[in-house]
Image: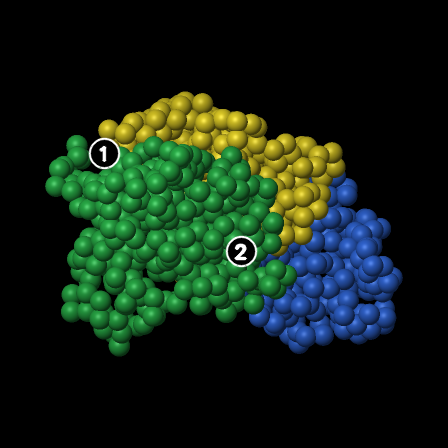
Chain colours: A green, B yellow, C blue
Amino acid sequence: MGHIAIEQVRCKGCGRCVVACPKNLIEYGTELNERGYAYVVFKGSPEQCGGCTLCAVSCPDQGIEVYNSRDRKVFVNTTGLTEAMTHYCPGCTHGVVHRLVAEVLEEMGLLGRTIGIAPVGCSVLAYEYFNFDMFEAAHGRAPAVATGAKRARPDRIVFTYQGDGDLASIGGNEILHAANRGEKITVIFLNNAIYGMTGGQMAPTTMPGQKTTTTPFGRDTADTGQPLRVAEMLATLQTPAFIARGTSHDAKGTLKTKKLIKEAFEHQAAGRCFSFVEVLSTCPTNWGMSPNEASDWVEEAMIPYYPLGILKRPEAVKA
Amino acid sequence: MSKVLMKGNEALGEAAIRAGCVHFFGYPITPQTEIPEYLCKRLPEVGGVFLQAESEVAAIHMVYGAAGAGVRCMTSSSSPGISLMAEGMSYIAACELPCVVINMMRAGPGLGGILPAQSDYFQATRGHGHGDYQCIVLAPASVQEAVDLMTLAFDLAEKYRNPVMVCADGMIGQMMEPVEFRTEGRGPPMAENDWALTGCEGRPRRIVNSLHLAPEQNFACNVRLKEKYDRAAREEVRFEVYGDERPDLLVVAFGTMARISKSAIDDLRREGRRVGLFRPITLNPWPYARCRAAMDAMPVGAKVLDVEMSMGQMIYDVKLAAEGTRAIEFFGKAGGLVPSPDEVAERIRALLP
Amino acid sequence: MKATNVLMAGFGGQGMLLAGKVLAQAAMAKGLQVSWLPSYGPEMRGGTANVIVCISKDPIASPLVSRPDALLAMNLPSLDRFEKSVVPGGTIVVNGTLIARESSRADCRVVRVDTRALAQAAGNERAVNFVMLGAYVGATGVLPAETVEEAIADEFREGKEKHIESNVAAFRVGLEEGRRAAFASEVHA
């Protein structure tokens, strides 16, 4: 049977793998690594591990390698990411989504032709993590920067990686018009229903009643409006596009989301249309929850309001 | 090459293409709209890219993206639109990317009006956006000079990897004058370089970034920028002197206001008065030393008159040049009113003994 | 030639900006320096539209002129506003079709033309601008008439050739009117 190798120094002890393992073979640890995190430990024996990789799929920190019964690596960390350890909080799924993007680009052989753009937000340092040419951009402006880069280099793959404060609030105009023009770019939109970087203020995507530092009594929708469903809004545009929503809160959802991201880049690589993948993600720190409570909250509170799936595909490739 | 009669705005658009800029991102605003209107027809003819952005904010960030991807690119706007571009200009300067921005200045503040003004002088020369950065600022006084300065603007933008602003008042954009283009057809593309993001195939990856959370690193970035600006101050200062060399009154004016002053000076010299003009062509770097030399050549008691289409902005640079050695008088109008040659002449007469 | 500055003013749509452009083109064709500076404003139909054309053998200093050598006034507001600014001995061409009063400037050469009637006679009632331009060129001899006619023809190239003849004809009837007025004023003097 298989086994896993946990790289202690990378582990932030978030425990997402603990929940992901179908056989409960991983447990929270008590020993601290050099960064002060109580790293998780594999408590099972090789006979028990099926090598399913769900632990590695859920890990936001590239901290788990999985081997099968013949000791062959079945989960390989992507070369699309640098070795750098991310600054994200334990249990934040930015790291998961970074990995999905990098894996897709690597699998498609596009790493050497890609220009990424990460604007202000928790992912502002994404240029430290993505292992290819990267722009850092001003708050909300990534779709405009991507427009300029793609128009300058139409044969390159250009994508933006934006959070909800960035894309849905200050950058509302830029995303709307880039989508409406049908820019041949890909937008990865992380929706965690809050401003993370600045410490937990209300975002346009914050849920009704959700407490944030600027809605301390819960979001009052009569006063601040309803959460914005950006994917649905963009899907109403007449311009052909690929618009989808996935999630990163659990391993199963993450695997599905990877397919959506892959399709998005395929549309761009074919020069077909604007492509947009919203990914629901967790912000345990600012939600005031443990990582796994946060995952549950995505399931219970967010997905009913932000349904998963493909909202729009270009006519030409509709099955 | 033969001369053609062209509107300033259209001539600027053509000049950009001749300078090898075939990527334009902009947003309509009077009195510069003929620039995008001209380029949207011309750029497709030369295989270029014209894009009407959703806002000036988006336009300048499209320029950021295109410049970062290593193509010659530009935008144009007028005062209120330039205010919206402040953010992007700061990023472009911080990331050391080359681009050209035209400001066809109109009267402000606020929505102001659409008539000519020089009231964005502070904005152009004192940073505009946030942080310790500067733009190189070129101020043409005629349509021909505007055309010539466009070529220079792209050269300087790439030499210094810094935004260059061509700052003219609305009159230059709206006026027609004969123009001669010194080169034929579409100019050359930006040279290969070691910073543009083009995909990292076969080379180490590159990053275009202005985030430096470590203060020492951020300071180093600021020092590097300042060294460039100091170098530009040594190497790029441009100006014109006109009229008497040892005048009893020296007018200091730029752009259209300098031309208007020339007519006043011509009239006064015909009356036997000794009057001169000092015209900065680079508003940043400002020709302090040369202006001072012009002042020092004047007789004792001679006067200096700063004339602007504003309430007095460049006058602070004239005072810096004088370093207290002479009193600086001011004459100007704002809001879209333009001092006429007669008004300038009258003001000069009143100051002369 | 002596440097000359002409202010052409009227309602938007009366074609004064175009007439000014033609004059500037013609002067350029003669190797002269020119500038063409329009008033620009939030103009709606019927708003004012002025242009100052400067012509000189030397580089033009100010394209904005306080005291023009000539005024072409297409309507009463233009005459009211600019009449006083014309230099003594200058030329004022008055559009008699729309302006009932006489010019108050006895020290200027005043040419009054019924632009509408003359344009109609030339077969193009819209060409009032070229009637005015003709009258100005005829009265002042600022440029050879044939150079201006060539500039008019150049303006109507590329699919608009059919308009050349009637616009040139309008210019010519204006030209005759201007020459007659200039001759009369010299005889009178």
Circles 2 and 1 on the same subunit: yes
Q: Amino acid at mark 1?
A: Val
Is residue C27 shown left or right of residue A100?
A: right
Where residue B177 appears, x then y in whole percent? 64, 45
Where residue A37 appears, x then y in whole percent? 17, 40
Residue at the spot x=86%, y=63% of the render?
C162
| Chain of the residue under the numbered disc 1 shown in the image | A
Q: CA distance from mark 2 to mark 1?
A: 39 Å
For disc 1, the marked residue is A9
Foreground of the two, C42 or A228: A228
Where residue C46 appears, x then y in whole percent? 61, 72
Residue at the spot x=63%, y=69% of the render?
C11
Where residue A260 appears, x then y in whole percent? 47, 55
| Chain of the residue under the numbered disc 2 shown in the image | A
N-terminal-most mark, 2 or 1: 1
Q: Is residue A209 above or below residue C167?
A: below
**SS assignment at label 2:** strand
For disc 2, the marked residue is A274
Q: Badge 1 local density, few (<14 within 10 Å), some, or many (20+)?
A: some
Q: Is residue C103 above or below residue A140?
A: below
Residue B4 picture quarter:
top right
